Image: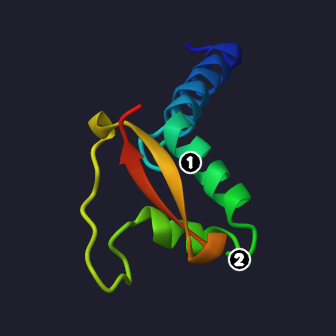
């Protein structure tokens, strides 16, 4: 015969296994943002305080979105991102330039 403590132990072990599987970290979710992109976002936000926040910065980071002439995505090998003021400093354009 099986004692009650044994059955309770089995149930506790089963719950531990079940909830351990449930609470495992899954690969779903938002991917990590690189340090370079975070620094670029902060640089853009401080250089353009009247842009209105995240939607405009997101649009600028997409590069080719809503522009009259398409802009190619510049690979990191071209250098650091620099801001180029335009229209008397009211607008900034961002490009990669070698140091």
Residue 34 seen: no
Q: 71 or 33: which is nearer to us?
A: 71
Q: In this view, does 8 lie to the left or right of 34?
A: right
Position of the C terminus by quadrant:
top left
Answer above or below: position of 16 versus 84: above
Residue visible at 40% across and 54% down in the picture = 95
Position of the N terminus by quadrant:
top right
Q: Residue 39: x, y in percent?
A: 60, 42
For disc 1, the marked residue is 40
Neighbourhood count class around disc 2 (C-alpha, 10 Å): few under 14, some 14–19, many 20 upward: few
Neighbourhood count class around disc 1 (C-alpha, 10 Å): few under 14, some 14–19, many 20 upward: some
Disc assigned to residue 52: 2
Q: Is residue 73 left or right of residue 51?
A: left
- Report, in whole angstroms, how far the alpha carbon at label 1 lies from the one at label 2: 16 Å
Answer above or below: position of 9 versus 63: above
Mark 1 or mark 2: which comes first in sequence? 1
Disc assigned to residue 78: none
Q: Is mark 1 on a helix, strand or loop?
A: helix
Figure quadrant of residue 3: top right
Residue visible at 32% across and 72% down in the picture = 64
Q: Residue 24: x, y in percent?
A: 52, 33
Residue 59 seen: yes
Residue visible at 37% across and 77% down in the picture = 65
Figure quadrant of residue 48: bottom right
Q: Is mark 2 on a helix, strand or loop?
A: loop
Would you say the residues marked 1 and 2 are in contact, meaning their CB atoms lie under 8 Å apart? no
Q: Residue 86: x, y in percent?
A: 54, 71
């Amino acid at each position: 015969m099986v004692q009650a403590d044994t059955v309770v132990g089995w149930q506790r072990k089963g719950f531990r296994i079940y909830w351990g599987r449930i609470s495992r970290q899954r690969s779903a979710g938002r991917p990590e943002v690189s340090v370079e992109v975070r620094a670029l976002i902060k640089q853009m936000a401080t250089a353009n305080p009247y842009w209105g926040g995240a939607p405009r910065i997101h649009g600028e980071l997409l590069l080719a979105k809503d522009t009259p002439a398409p802009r190619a995505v510049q690979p990191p090998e071209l250098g650091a991102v620099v801001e180029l003021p335009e229209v008397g400093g009211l607008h900034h354009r961002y490009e990669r330039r070698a140091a």
